[in-house]
Image (cartoon, helix red, strand yellow):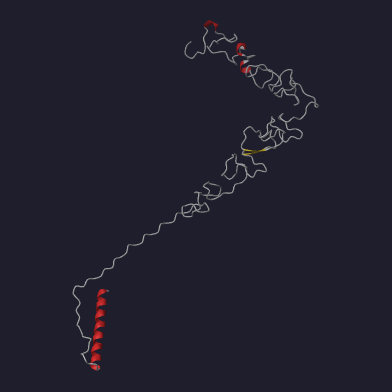
Amino acid sequence: MDPGEECDNGSDNSDSVSGACRLQCRNASCGDFVADYTSGEQCDQGIGNSATEPNRCRSDCSLPHCGDKVVDRGEMCDDGNPLPGDGCTSSCTWETIDIIQPRCGDGRIQGSEQCDDGNVTGGDGCSSLCQAEFVLGAMEEVNPVLVAGGIVCGDGVLIAPEECDDGNPDPGDGCSPLCRTEIALCGNGIFETGEQCDDGNQDDMDGCNALCQIVALPKPAAPSPPPVAQVIPLLSEPLSYTYIPVRAPIGDTGPAAIAVMASGAAAGVGWMRRRRKLHI
């Protein structure tokens, strides 16, 4: 075979023989206008194959038949299944009204059914008795048309008794996994509705206050000025004073002795005042 060829049988290549390598060196396939019976095809109308048009070869190269959801020649109905009791028999003829009985799981809401999702499995929004269920968690297989009254928490559809439904089963986003409105709790470290921040505490001094609102950080206190040293001036000359005796002559107790003692005391007080001024 040459590059790009799928097959090559030389002179045996054919566009009309079942299962033969085609003239363009391509393998036989559904849609090539040749019914390749050896590969399981029942018919092949090429571009005329259809999954919806009556009396046509189907898209998978199978013959039209009862149960393919297309009313073909000779059929009165075709509901896509061979089950009785749903209005169309397994031979694609209409059933009488006496035969048609409500049956949970037939995909039709009838009688006392609140829903019918085509199965008798509970836990998917429609119970095995075709009664609406409240189901936790998003269930992609639930058909909201068939499950007429089913309530699925987490499917993004708000239906009573749900208080909320945000389309997910996650907590901490305002809607709980039970579809109940969550109250924001400041300080739990989870950023919730109404909060500007949540740093996991209720400290007001770290930029996120006790109400989980952003606040400015406090300015640092100004440093205290250094202490100023006190300078004591040195005396350039020694202090001089005049000694005045304060003791009266021995044996003298008269007025003269008292005058001598008073003058000495006055001189001492004056000296002390002058010394204090020099040190200030």
Question: In this image, 254 relative to 145: left or right?
Answer: left
Q: Nearer the viewer, residue 115 or 134?
A: 134
The image shows residue 92 at horizontal and vertical percentages of: 74, 21
Q: Determine the residue located farthest toward the right in the rendered image.
A: 98
The residue lying at 24 percent from left, 88 percent from top is 261
The image shows residue 201 at horizontal and vertical percentages of: 50, 51
Above-or-below relation of 74 to 121 = above
Quarter of the C terminus within the rendering: bottom left
The residue lying at 61 percent from left, 17 percent from top is 47
The image shows residue 197 at horizontal and vertical percentages of: 51, 49
Question: In this image, 234 relative to 193: left or right?
Answer: left
Q: Determine the residue located farthest toward the top in the rendered image.
A: 11
The residue lying at 62 percent from left, 11 percent from top is 37
Q: How many marks?
A: 0
Q: Determine the residue located farthest toward the bottom in the rendered image.
A: 254
Above-or-below relation of 60 to 156 = above
Above-or-below relation of 51 to 234 = above
The residue lying at 26 percent from left, 77 percent from top is 276
Q: Nearer the viewer, residue 214 or 226?
A: 226
The image shows residue 142 at horizontal and vertical percentages of: 65, 33
Q: Quadrant of residue 46?
A: top right
Q: Nearer the viewer, residue 123 or 154?
A: 123
Q: Quadrant of residue 228?
A: bottom left
Question: In this image, 193 relative to 120: left or right?
Answer: left
Q: Quadrant of residue 139?
A: top right
